Image (spheres, rainbow, N blue to C red):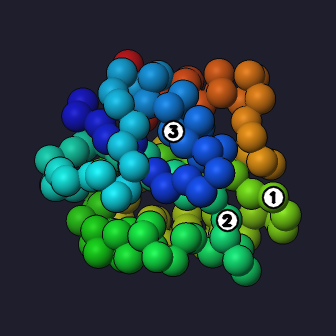
Amino acid sequence: MKTAVIFWSGTGNTEAMAKALAEGAGVEAVNVADFTGSISDYEALAFGCPAMGDEQLEEAEFEPFFARIENELSGKRVALFGSYDWGTGDWMHTWEERVKNDGAELIEEGYITNLDANETELGELRELGKKLAGV
């Protein structure tokens, strides 16, 4: 199953999560600014973005990218992940609803960590990557 892991990270926490998930899926994680592919080429996609500001997706790069491609997610397997420093995870719940409303198959609840992921969480992300890619 052709799989992509696309992320934005400000401090490196979400990047580490992306790399673990991508390792499980057997692909390379790609920073959103470097993604040049077409969403239509993929059957499974993982998107990673930390909570920013008032529990929202990063506004300068990630949100514009996601808004542009979300109408292409129908019928695709999707995983969401990200880190946060404070709050209750509302940004992830809102993001999950967007993906479901776009007609994607959210393979499980969005995966969130408080700040940097520990070894157990990175292991869980590797397993999520395997599940996403059908490995």
In the rendered view, would you say 98 is above or below 48?
A: below
- On the image, numbered disc 1 is attached to which residue? 85
Q: CA distance from mark 3 to mark 2?
A: 15 Å
As drawn, the label of residue 15 is none
Q: Earlier in the sequence, mark 3 or mark 1?
A: 3
Q: Position of residue 33 (x, y in %)?
A: 34, 58
Tell me where residue 2 appears, x and y as whole percent. 22, 34
Q: Residue furthest front?
A: 11
Q: Which amino acid is tagged 1?
A: Asp
Q: Secondary structure at mark 2?
A: loop
Within the image, what quadrant is residue 90 found in? bottom right
Helix, strand or loop at label 1? It is loop
Residue position marked by numbered label 3 in the rendering: 18
- Mark nearer the N terminus (3 vs 2): 3
**Alpha carbon separation for disc pair 3 and 1:** 17 Å
User: Dot 3: within a 10 Å radius of its alpha carbon, few (fewer than 14), some, or many (20 or more) residues?
Assistant: many
SS for callout 3: helix
The answer to whether mark 3 and mark 2 are in CB contact below 8 A is no
Image quarter hosting the N terminus: top left
Task: Residue type at mark 2: give it.
Answer: Ala
Relative to 36, residue 67 above or below: below
Rendered residue at 27%/52% (across/down): 35
Residue at x 40%, y 37% (from the top left corner): 29
Identify the image quadrant of residue 69. bottom left
